[in-house]
Amino acid sequence: MGEIHYPKIDCFNLSRGIEKENLRVHADGSLAQSPHPAALGSALCHQYITTDFAECLPEMVTKVHQSMGGLLQELEHIQHFLYQSLPEDEYLWPASMPPFIADENAVPIAEFGSSNVGQMKHIYRLGLSHRYGRVMQAIAGIHYNVSFDDALFEALRKSKGAQVPLQDFKNQSYMSLIRRFLDHQWLLLYLFGAAPVAMESSVGTRRPCYLQQASAHTWVVPEGTSLRLSPFGYQ
């Protein structure tokens, strides 16, 4: 398969990486209770595929790429390999918000083996389950990691006449970028991440008036953007 080509933009070696999570489910939408597929190797040591909070929540991790085409190509290859390694009766749930979950015990906490590091990872997730609940921790997502070459920050620092050290200027610039993102977050989520539907098990019993029932176990915000980043998910 050839590399995906995009218009070339000189952005001082912009570096990108993606972490993508998907729940393993059965055809009826129930969470897979099987362990991390043996064909994937160790969740603790594998370079590209691990687990997040739950045993049924695999996470795909790419290398760092300067090319967007190369990044998406690698992610596609990792996901294809993951699909090939799943049991025949399992699929990857495509949405961030999980399917209907009968109770907290239906979300198995990830296992990483008997080593000290593996046990610490499991205990850490056990703590998260007590603090936030397993259903919330079963929410999946895509993490888009980005960094800029020092040459860009050096050029910006000189153009602005900033007298602070380069590292301080980089920190200030990244924080400014985050504030800009938050200013336009609603639009970005609407265009690229709209997910206004959630199962009953995710929204709980205390439902605000803007939630409307769409089916027996499904609730929706008609003009909503992302319930994953609402009070029902991660804020």
Image (cartoon, rainbow, N blue to C red):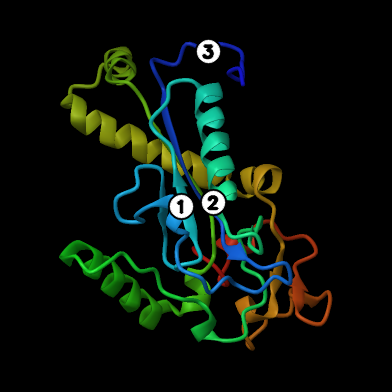
Q: What residue is rendered at 50% in x and 29% in y?
A: 71
- Looking at this view, is 76 or 42 the one in front? 42
The residue that label 2 is drawn on is 85
CB atoms at circles 2 and 1 under 8 Å apart?
Answer: yes
Q: Residues within 10 Å of mark 2 (few under 14, many from 20)?
A: some
* Amino acid type at image mark 1: Ala
Extreme residue toward the right, this view: 215
The residue that label 3 is drawn on is 9
Helix, strand or loop status at disc 3: loop
Judge from the rendering whether residue 161 lies leftward or rightward of residue 132; answer left or right: left
The x, y position of residue 94, in whole percent, is: 66, 55
Q: Which mark is residue 39?
A: 1
The x, y position of residue 192, in whole percent, is: 66, 43
CB atoms at circles 1 and 3 under 8 Å apart?
Answer: no
Quote the CA–CA distance across marks 2 and 1: 6 Å
Above or below — where is 153 with respect to 159?
below
- Looking at this view, is 113 or 30 the one in front? 113
Q: Residues within 10 Å of mark 1 (few under 14, many from 20)?
A: few
Helix, strand or loop status at disc 2: helix
- Picture quadrant of residue 48: top left
Quote the CA–CA distance across marks 1 and 3: 39 Å
The x, y position of residue 77, in whole percent, is: 54, 35
Q: Which mark is residue 224?
A: none
Sequence-wise first label, 2 or 3:
3
Sequence-wise first label, 1 or 3:
3
* Amino acid type at image mark 2: Ser
